Image (spheres, rainbow, N blue to C red):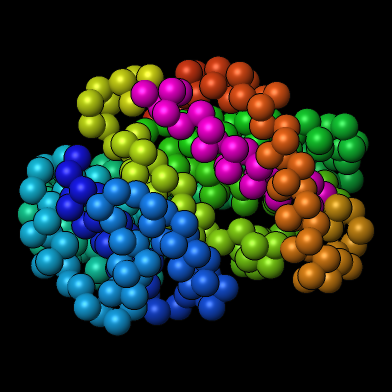
Amino acid sequence: MQASETRAIVTLSLLAAFVDGEKHERERAEIKRIAEGLSQADGLNLPTLYQDVLMKRVSLDSVAAALTSAESKQLAYEMAVCVCDADGVQSVAEQRFLASVQQTLGLGTAVTAQFTQQADAMAAAPLAAPSATPTPVATVAKPGDAELDNTILNAAIVNGALELLPESLSTMAIIPLQMRLVYGIGKAHGFELDRGHIKDFLATVGVGLTSQYLEQAGRKLLGGLLGKLGGGMVGGLARGLGQQAVSTGMSFAATYALGHVAKRYYAGGRTMSTQVLKDAYASMAQEAQGLHGRYLPAIQEKARTLDSGKVLAMVRGT
């Protein structure tokens, strides 16, 4: 993919991130940090792009003009959808924006409908996995520390594996799976959490929703992994296991740290201050980075067993 197309895709993603005008200052600061962190890529000046988007110096038409191939247009649209869905069901402003993107890029409904439906289903996925025969609360045994630790580790391995997959939806799936992990940990300690509370918890420890997707997808894009170009899921995975092995530490560490901080927070009756939560998350994330090498073979093996259907099923809890 040409550098001009990569730049255009990143620009469109930033436009999507700010289209509803409702991003918290913490999320905006994270997006800026990510743009600056990705700015080392050849031919890209992402900090300037960030300012151009905020100051409305770029337009959808100028982005579309730089996307010359059908593959780049489809990938740009997919990333825009995922950015809009990352923090939940789309707002009216986001729906209008995506309709404009589809029209401006000249993408037919037949090309975009399936992906949009799958992304929307992920965004609206239930926090609790559906159960055919609900168990009375009084009979549910609380999991022990070892069981919760194993659940957290498995979730971190799965999300590390998802970062290796080339499809846009695989990257997007990391966020709802993290939210489900926090929900399950809260429930294990007697708290019935809703989506709003979990979003606030993630934001408090420093895990943004839109910003996390942008960082993960942006690194894949700049590394040449994101998308189905050059061989689809299997071909992309083969490249990913070689090119992206180091970067899987981000999703593994974030999920591992998030799970353990949530365990400590809810076990203690939600009494930790904001600063203590942030410090605990930062410390645990650093510890998780040190563990990543030990679990990298398991991450890679898990990635080999996943496809888009299995990813969707995991998010839906089916």
Residue drawn at point x = 33 percent, y = 26 percent? 236
Which quarter of the figure is the C terminus placed in? top right
Q: Is residue 94 magenta?
A: no
Q: Is residue 9 visible?
A: no
Q: Is residue 285 visible?
A: yes
Which quarter of the figure is the N terminus placed in? top left
Q: Nearer the viewer, residue 63 or 114?
A: 63
Please report the bounds of the magenta region as a residue range. Answer: 239-263
Q: Is residue 51 above or below residue 233?
A: below
Q: Is residue 68 above or below residue 86?
A: above
- The spot of residue 11 in percent (x, y) is 27, 62
Q: Is residue 111 above or below residue 101?
A: above
Task: Indicate left or right for 235 with 134 as reference.
Answer: left
* Quadrant position of residue 143: top right
- The spot of residue 117 in percent (x, y) is 32, 47
Q: Nearer the viewer, residue 239 or 141?
A: 239
What main secondary structure does the magenta stretch of the protein show? helix
- The spot of residue 190 in percent (x, y) is 85, 54
Q: Is residue 39 above or below residue 71?
A: below
Q: Nearer the viewer, residue 42 or 239?
A: 42
Numbered marks: total? 0
Task: Indicate left or right for 260 with 118 as reference.
Answer: right
Residue drawn at point x = 25 percent, y = 52 percent? 43
Q: Is residue 250 magenta?
A: yes
Residue drawn at point x = 29 percent, y = 48 percent? 42
- The spot of residue 154 in percent (x, y) is 68, 30
Residue drawn at point x = 27 percent, y = 26 percent? 232
Of all residues, the one furthest to the bottom in this rendering is 55
